């Protein structure tokens, strides 16, 4: 069954949900999908876009970037850039987006403001404004909003300096136009950043990054009172990470904890799962179990309906390109480098070297050919059974060498393998990271020849 999110309509205002207008004090939304908001960075800064990007997912683990991976909203004032966006479904219907007002990586800059947008459906963004949160000589990082039902208002949580260290502050608001005075929300006595809120079963969970050991920790409270949270986890770690997000599955008692690598040089997202958020038990997922949008940094994830998911795809469109992941090295993607076809660990630049248009096969329309995004008119082909990137010469031999038939994955039928069109006893595989078309006979061969087509 889908997760039912309660949406409170204050007074007699109309709530429009999935195309239905209701005058009610309490309505419900059946969340069956997810939307992710993020900005982008890559190791050599090629992908740096400090604006709002969106991706959607039906299972919460595999993602489709929208708008060809380009921004859907860009700040109109302040620094002109954003980091750390957060999307919240308002209890009166529609959404609000808040974000750090920061362009690039100048983390020494003081700024008392955040960016704010309103959105009825995430297909358009209105009412852009900067909202001043405090007058302290410090930053206002990673804002995240939540609804405080006991007080009938929203909280906006963010990181700012307190007594020489970073702590979490909160301001309250009913309209995201004016806010109350800042209150110290969580200060364990050492530097913490990136607070994220999750409520379930009458308990509120606050996850954060600790600078003591670089781990993600969880605290909990029966109220949303400032100062009322007590840490209950021992810390989750998978490298230098920050930016936790806690997301519940819509279909079962399963939670995912996402974390972001600290540096764009290692710009990737990590994920863990738990069957019970109330205990200290998080298990790391492998890269075979989840994907991330290309170059996504410090994301936010919000539940949406299936109708909203489909409407976002219709509005912004799925990418006209794909990335192809290795089965047995699932952090590696097919790319070209020096015109050789190979697999390399994500992330890397130039990242367009891993983007492909899987077009109808040049020699057989029932097959596929890998057309390069970064080198128009170039395709992956085999020559001497080694796979290279080459310009289409229009010849029959080139077309045959560049055509493959998609078949169920040789190591896992839920994945994909690619059989050579002109050497049907051979499949595309990697060997010492280089791509070849080879006869597949062993279990290792089958794993090397299995891939997932995604984004």
Image: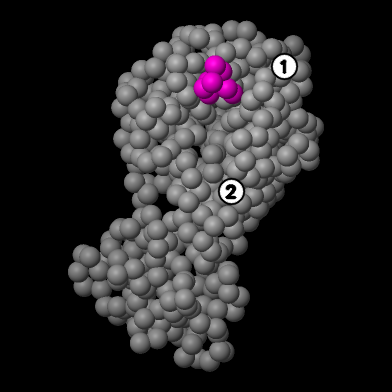
Compared with 440, 162 (above or below) is: above
Q: Which residue is mark 2?
A: 40
Q: Residue at x 21, y 65 (%)?
A: 443
Would you call the spot at circle 2 few (<14 residues within 10 Å), some (14-19), or many (20 or more)? many
Which sits earlier in the primary sequence, circle 1 or circle 2? Answer: 2
Compared with 122, 377 (above or below) is: below
Q: Residue at x 38, y 23 (%)?
A: 277
Gap in angstroms between the C-alphas marked 1 and 2: 29 Å
Q: Secondary structure at mark 2?
A: strand
Q: Between 266 and 197, which is closer to the camera in this rendering?
A: 266
Q: Position of residue 290 (x, y in %)?
A: 41, 46
Q: Secondary structure at mark 1?
A: loop
Q: Position of residue 206 (x, y in %)?
A: 47, 21
Say if the magenta span includes residue 161. yes
Q: Is residue 102 left or right of residue 250?
A: right
Q: Residue at x 51, y 61 (%)?
A: 349
Report the span colored magenta. 160-168
Q: How many marks?
A: 2
User: Can residue 13 be seen here?
Assistant: yes
Say if the magenta span includes residue 237. no
Q: Which residue is mark 1?
A: 179
Q: Is residue 361 left or right of residue 85?
A: left
Residue farthest to the left, as pictured: 442
> What colouring method underlies this structural image?
one colour
Would you call the spot at circle 1 few (<14 residues within 10 Å), some (14-19), or many (20 or more)? some
**Mark number, residue 270:** none
């Amino acid at each position: 069954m889908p997760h039912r999110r309660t949406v409170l309509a204050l007074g007699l205002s109309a709530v429009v949900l999935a195309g239905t207008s209701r005058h009610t004090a309490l309505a419900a939304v059946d969340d069956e999908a997810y939307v992710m908001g993020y900005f982008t960075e890559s190791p050599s800064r090629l992908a740096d876009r400090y604006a709002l990007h969106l991706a959607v997912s039906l299972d919460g683990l595999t993602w489709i970037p929208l708008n060809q991976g380009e921004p859907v909203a860009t700040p109109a004032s302040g620094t002109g850039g954003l980091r750390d966006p957060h999307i919240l479904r308002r209890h009166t219907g529609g959404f609000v987006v808040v974000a750090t007002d920061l362009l690039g990586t100048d983390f020494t800059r003081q700024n008392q403001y955040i960016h704010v947008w309103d959105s009825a459906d995430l297909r358009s963004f209105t009412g852009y404004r900067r909202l001043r949160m405090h007058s302290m000589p410090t930053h206002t990082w990673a804002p995240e909003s939540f609804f405080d039902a006991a007080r009938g208002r929203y909280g906006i949580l963010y990181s700012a300096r307190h007594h020489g260290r970073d702590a979490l502050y909160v301001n309250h608001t009913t309209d995201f136009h004016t806010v109350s005075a800042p209150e110290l929300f969580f200060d364990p006595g050492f530097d913490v950043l990136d607070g994220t809120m999750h409520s379930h079963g009458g308990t509120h969970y606050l996850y954060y990054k600790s600078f003591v050991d670089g781990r993600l920790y969880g605290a909990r409270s029966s109220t949303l009172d400032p100062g009322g949270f007590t840490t209950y986890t021992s810390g989750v770690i998978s490298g230098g990470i920050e930016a936790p997000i806690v997301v519940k599955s819509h279909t079962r008692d399963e939670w995912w904890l996402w974390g972001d690598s600290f540096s764009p040089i290692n710009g990737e997202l990590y994920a863990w799962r738990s069957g019970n958020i109330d205990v200290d038990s998080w298990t790391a997922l492998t890269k075979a179990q989840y994907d991330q949008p290309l170059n996504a940094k410090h994301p936010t994830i919000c539940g949406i309906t299936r109708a909203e998911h489909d409407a976002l795809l219709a509005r912004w469109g799925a990418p006209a390109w794909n990335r192809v992941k290795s089965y047995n090295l699932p952090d590696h993607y097919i790319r070209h480098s020096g015109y050789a076809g190979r697999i390399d660990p994500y992330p890397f630049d130039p990242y367009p070297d891993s983007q492909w248009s899987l077009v109808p096969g040049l020699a057989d329309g029932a097959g596929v050919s890998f057309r390069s995004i970064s080198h128009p008119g170039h395709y992956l082909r085999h020559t001497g059974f080694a796979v290279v990137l080459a310009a289409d010469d229009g010849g029959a031999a080139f077309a045959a060498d560049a055509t493959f038939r998609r078949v169920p994955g040789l190591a896992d039928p839920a994945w994909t393998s690619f059989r050579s069109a002109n050497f049907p006893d051979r499949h595309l595989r990697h060997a010492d990271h280089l791509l070849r078309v080879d006869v597949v006979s062993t279990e290792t061969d089958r794993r090397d020849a299995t891939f997932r087509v995604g984004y």
